[in-house]
Image (cartoon, grey):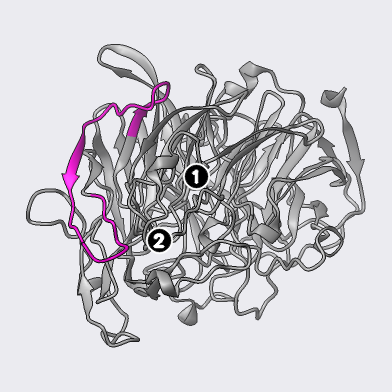
């Protein structure tokens, strides 16, 4: 019956300005708009690439952000014009800073659903931008005492089975009526009182909603993935990425110096990415976060943090894991989305999974077994014998081309080093201890501040084209941070009961001095199809189409510090620029999507900046230093072929 659920909504706030440029605040409209609820998708529909609709954060279960649409081509993309634009008004003019607008919109049947950090879920007409309804979480009623603040990272919703699913900063997962925005059910994935928040978009598959948890960096109980019955929100299974005493992997943790891990749920592992699914092998695949505190932990590799893991879809049983960083001291976890793809390995067709790490290497694993399908070197790394550091003697380094443009070490190991050329902080440290510039995996203790590359490949969504075999990634060259160890006696237990980051940090460089990287790595040949160095940080993510066009957002022109972003179209095969949209009044820091309604293909993106890597908002000429709450959509002029 849900597949026939339809409702006509009239007289609601809605329609935006259709002329080029900044949209006005959404205004009253009496134009009726029909909403069609997403049906109970079949397994075949769930496993298909995105086409007319974009129903999941990654476009489909594989997270590849690939669409089979071909109306917009390399020859006509230059004629794209603004179809509509809406100002949600979440970030009012004159506001110095707003929540980051980094969400991927989802769309079904002509309705778009967008998540904002501070005002919940909006339903918009995907053809006009008319706002149909808004579900703003009633935190005061739900959680007296909870404050959403700026909302944190809120990456988007999912639509399926006659519902809209979304997670919120207070640890709530909800199902909404897609026609009205009314609450169908709410479940607590993890309580905010214990530091849990939801920073990943939910993923729906065969009646199950998967939702990872975050908060470990702030001292929450440890994180993982929960699975819920889509019909009523009942918990089906739960998996934690920090094993408890007696569980497999627990012996890779130690109370040792610092005593942060006690077998009592406090080890970090915040998950920032939406999982992917290998339906053939019945696996949910996700990358996990770093251990906490960052330093002064006992010896051990700290499974299953900094790992790509494969979980049984129906039980949550850990089927395999591959740890990418042992005993992480640098927050070098896996925030970027895993993507599942088909390839040939040693003459056999297999399903594989790829993920780009913060230091710029791409991991390529057999999705069924978790074993690498490309060469990985066991590399000796610098050691530090100071109390509580407990450095791992070696680290695995995949021998795939590195997407970063950092200077490399002379020893040929291909490591990446921080330099004074990228550093804009004062050379005088807060406690007067020396400032030392090091390379990746350089340990640090209490005697100096060690500057290393930091979070260069973060969560801007990667994409994959099954036509070109290109794995397209977006990142930051030059981002560095300085760290000093916090001794065990000085570590402080946070309100949720665990130790937070447990590290002293120098703020790092100003992003306006950094450059971006935008690259396509052929996962068949393991060579770059193209490897671009941008004058501004790349912090949007990409979407590919079967016609060979890839879309990506920009923070702004030049260094990006103007705060006036835009969408660019490039050739998926060569990376050559094909089209730039007009400038927006804010940064385009969210991933674009593409969809089709009544034969018209659209490209859309929420525009509003991000707080994680702002390119000098103090000098931005945009209305709010690059921030905002706009949605833009583009289409070909009528009659274009």
Question: Which residue is the extreme one toward the top?
Answer: 348
Badge 1 or badge 2: first in the primary sequence: 1
For label 1, the SS is loop
Give the residues in magenta. 364-392
Find residue 95 and name its label.
none
Q: Is residue 375 magenta?
A: yes
Q: Which residue is mark 2?
A: 294
**Closer-to-camera residue (125/403):** 403
Depth order, front residue of 191/389 = 389
**Residue matched to label 1:** 242
Name the spot of residue 219 as percent of width and height, x first.
55, 61
- Total tally of numbered discs in the picture: 2
Residue 490 visible in the displayed image: yes
Q: Residues within 10 Å of mark 1 (few under 14, many from 20)?
A: many
Q: Would you say residue 126 is visible in this rendering?
A: no
Furthest residue in direction left, as rendered: 411
Where 515 sits versus 474, above or below? below
Q: Residue at x 51, y 71 (%)?
A: 492
On the image, the x and y values in percent for residue 2 come to: 85, 26
Say left or right for 119 vs 565.
right
Q: Residue at x 68, y 49 (%)?
A: 190
């Amino acid at each position: 019956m849900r597949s026939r659920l339809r409702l006509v909504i009239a007289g609601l706030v809605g329609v935006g300005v259709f002329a080029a440029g900044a949209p006005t605040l959404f205004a009253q409209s009496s134009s009726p708009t029909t909403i069609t609820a997403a049906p109970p998708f079949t397994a075949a529909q769930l496993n298909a690439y995105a086409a007319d609709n974009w129903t999941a954060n990654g476009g489909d279960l594989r997270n590849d952000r690939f669409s089979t649409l071909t109306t917009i081509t390399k020859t006509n993309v230059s004629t794209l014009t603004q179809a509509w634009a809406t100002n949600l008004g979440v970030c009012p003019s004159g506001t110095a800073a707003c929540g980051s607008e980094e969400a991927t919109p989802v769309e079904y049947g002509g309705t778009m659903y967008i998540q904002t950090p501070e005002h919940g879920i909006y339903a918009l007409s995907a053809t006009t931008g008319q706002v149909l309804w808004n579900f703003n979480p009633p935190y005061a009623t739900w959680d007296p005492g909870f404050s959403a603040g700026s909302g944190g990272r809120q990456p988007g919703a999912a639509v399926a089975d006659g519902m809209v699913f979304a997670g919120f900063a207070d640890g709530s997962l909800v199902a909404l009526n897609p026609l009205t925005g009314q609450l169908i059910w709410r479940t607590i994935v993890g309580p905010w009182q214990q530091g849990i928040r939801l920073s990943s978009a939910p993923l729906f598959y065969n009646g199950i909603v998967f939702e990872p948890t975050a908060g470990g960096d702030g001292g929450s109980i440890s994180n993982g993935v929960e699975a819920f019955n889509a019909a009523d929100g009942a918990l089906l299974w739960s998996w934690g990425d920090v094993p408890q005493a007696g569980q497999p992997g627990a012996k890779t943790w130690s109370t040792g110096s610092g005593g942060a891990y006690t077998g009592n749920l406090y080890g970090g592992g915040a998950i920032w990415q939406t999982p992917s699914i290998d339906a053939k092998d019945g696996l949910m695949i996700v990358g996990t976060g770093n251990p906490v505190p960052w330093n002064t932990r006992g010896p051990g590799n700290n499974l299953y943090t900094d790992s790509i893991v494969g979980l049984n879809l129906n039980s949550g049983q850990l089927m395999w894991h591959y740890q990418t960083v042992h005993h992480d001291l640098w927050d070098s976890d896996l925030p970027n989305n895993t993507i599942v793809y088909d390839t040939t390995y040693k003459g056999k067709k297999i399903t594989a999974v790829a993920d780009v790490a913060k230091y710029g290497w791409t991991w390529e694993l057999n999705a069924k077994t978790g074993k690498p399908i490309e060469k990985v070197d066991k590399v000796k790394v610098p050691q530090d014998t100071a109390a509580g550091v407990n450095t791992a003697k070696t680290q695995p380094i995949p021998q795939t081309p590195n997407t970063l443009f950092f200077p490399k070490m002379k020893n040929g190991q291909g490591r990446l080093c921080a330099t004074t050329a990228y550093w804009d902080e004062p050379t005088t440290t807060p406690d007067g201890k020396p400032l030392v510039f090091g390379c990746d995996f350089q340990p640090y203790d209490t005697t100096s501040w060690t500057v290393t590359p930091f979070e260069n490949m973060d969560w801007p969504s990667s994409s994959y084209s099954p036509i070109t075999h290109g794995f397209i990634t977006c990142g930051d060259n030059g981002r560095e941070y300085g760290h000093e160890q916090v001794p065990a006696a000085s570590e402080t237990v946070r309100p949720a009961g665990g130790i937070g980051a447990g590290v002293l940090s120098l703020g790092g460089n100003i992003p306006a001095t950094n450059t971006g990287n935008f690259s396509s790595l052929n996962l068949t040949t393991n060579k770059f199809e193209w490897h671009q160095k941008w004058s501004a940080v790349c912090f949007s993510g990409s979407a590919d189409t079967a016609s060979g066009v890839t879309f990506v957002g920009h923070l702004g022109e030049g260094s990006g510090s103007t705060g006036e972003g835009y969408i660019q179209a490039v050739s998926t095969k060569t990376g050559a620029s094909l089209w730039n949209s007009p400038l927006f009044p804010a940064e385009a820091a969210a991933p674009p999507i593409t969809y089709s309604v009544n034969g018209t293909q659209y490209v859309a993106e929420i525009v509003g900046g991000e707080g994680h890597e702002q390119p000098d908002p103090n000098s931005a000429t945009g209305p709010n230093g690059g921030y905002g709450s706009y949605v833009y959509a583009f289409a070909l002029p009528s009659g274009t072929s």
